[in-house]
Amino acid sequence: MSQRKATIIDQQILDNKVILTLHVDADITDFEGHFPGYPILPGVTQIDWAIYYGKKLLNSGTRFAGMEVIKFQEPILPNSVVLLTLTLDANKQKLHFAYSSKNSRHSSGRIKLLADE
């Protein structure tokens, strides 16, 4: 799991939705070894950040119970600026996430998160 998160440039919080503008700093350790000569942000890091910010900003559960419709379309490179959009469907206990930038959709999906015990 990621030790350090991206730098938040801007955040908008609406009832059950958060939009974060993130600068994905090149010195995030998750880039190391993934992949030598062509670093990309690992998918597991993207999911980790979605869960982390879902809990922190939308008070979602954090007990992982599965994923649905996960798609990784375009790599997130060091020093990228991306939007992370999170929407919580509390009734279904699902956190929808999407990473995008000006010209790309990077990844998206739904994470089933149960309430903390």
Image (cartoon, helix red, strand yellow):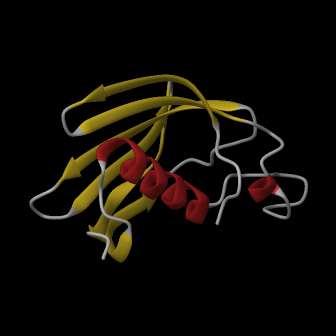
Rendered position, 73 above or below 101: below
- The one nearer the camera, 32 or 90, is 90
In the image, is 112 to the left or to the right of 82? Answer: left
Image position, residue 48 (x, y; %): 53, 60
Rendered position, 16 above or below 45: above
Counting the numbered discs, the total is: 0
- The one nearer the camera, 40 or 51, is 51
Q: Residue furthest right?
A: 37
Rendered position, 86 above or below 89: above
At 80% from the left and 55% from the top, the residue drawn is 29
In the image, is 80 to the left or to the right of 9? Answer: right
At 30% from the left and 77% from the top, the residue drawn is 117
Image position, residue 10 (x, y; %): 50, 21
At 64% from the left and 45% from the top, the residue drawn is 5
Rendered position, 53 above or below 82: below
State the quadrant of the N terminus.
bottom right
Q: Residue furthest front?
A: 117
The answer to which image quadrant residue 9 occupies is: top right
Image position, residue 36 (x, y; %): 89, 60
In the image, is 33 to the left or to the right of 62? Answer: right
The answer to which image quadrant residue 27 occupies is: top right
Image position, residue 81 (x, y; %): 61, 28
